[in-house]
Image (tube, rainbow, N blue to C red):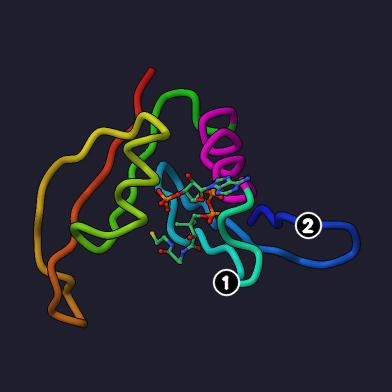
Amino acid sequence: MHVACTGAEVAGFMALHLNMVEQLFIEPAQQCRGIGKQLPDVAKAELPAGFYLTTVQQSRAGRFYERESLQPGEISIHPRLGHQIIRYDWHL
Ligand SMILES: CC(C)(COP(=O)(O)OP(=O)(O)OC[C@H]1O[C@@H](n2cnc3c(N)ncnc32)[C@H](O)[C@@H]1OP(=O)(O)O)[C@@H](O)C(=O)NCCC(=O)NCCS
């Protein structure tokens, strides 16, 4: 787990598990300030052999990951919630 802070305040977090980014959230009031884009760089440093994640298809998060050089891949259905999700991979 990596926590992003602004001063003494927690602004967001990223949870890594094996070669997967399981969670990445920035607190709404802290979004659009360039905080989120620092976390994929941490994942790249911690997982230099590559990693993947899934997120909602055609979402702001997807555009965010594509800007951070993650490659869009397979589209599937979320196993519990039933909406479409897309896999993103990062490799050197
Ligand atoms: C997706 C998410 C992690 C991005 O985090 P963030 O801190 O807002 O990201 P950044 O600030 O680095 O960039 C996001 C946007 O702000 C813009 N931005 C970055 N720095 C900026 C600045 N200084 N001033 C104005 N805008 C800025 C970026 O261009 C980008 O715009 P876009 O969304 O229109 O493409 C965050 O929005 C989030 O937690 N969303 C909800 C949860 C979620 O979807 N998580 C991913 C699930 S896998």
Q: CA distance from mark 1 to mark 2?
A: 14 Å
Mark 1: which amino acid? Pro
Marker disc for residue 80:
none
Mark 1 sits near ligand 1, with its Cβ under 8 Å away: yes
Q: Residue at x 19, y 54 (%)?
A: 86
Residue 35 within the segment the image draws in magenta: yes
Left or right placement of residue 31 versus residue 51 in this view? right
Residue 77 sits in quarter:
bottom left
Quickly name the residue at label 2.
5
Query: Magenta span covers which residues?
Result: 34-45
Local SS, label 1: helix
| Main secondary-structure element of the magenta-colored stretch | helix
Disc count in the image? 2
Above or below, 56 relative to 38:
below
Residue 41 within the segment the image draws in magenta: yes
Mark 2: which amino acid? Cys
Above or below, 19 relative to 80:
above
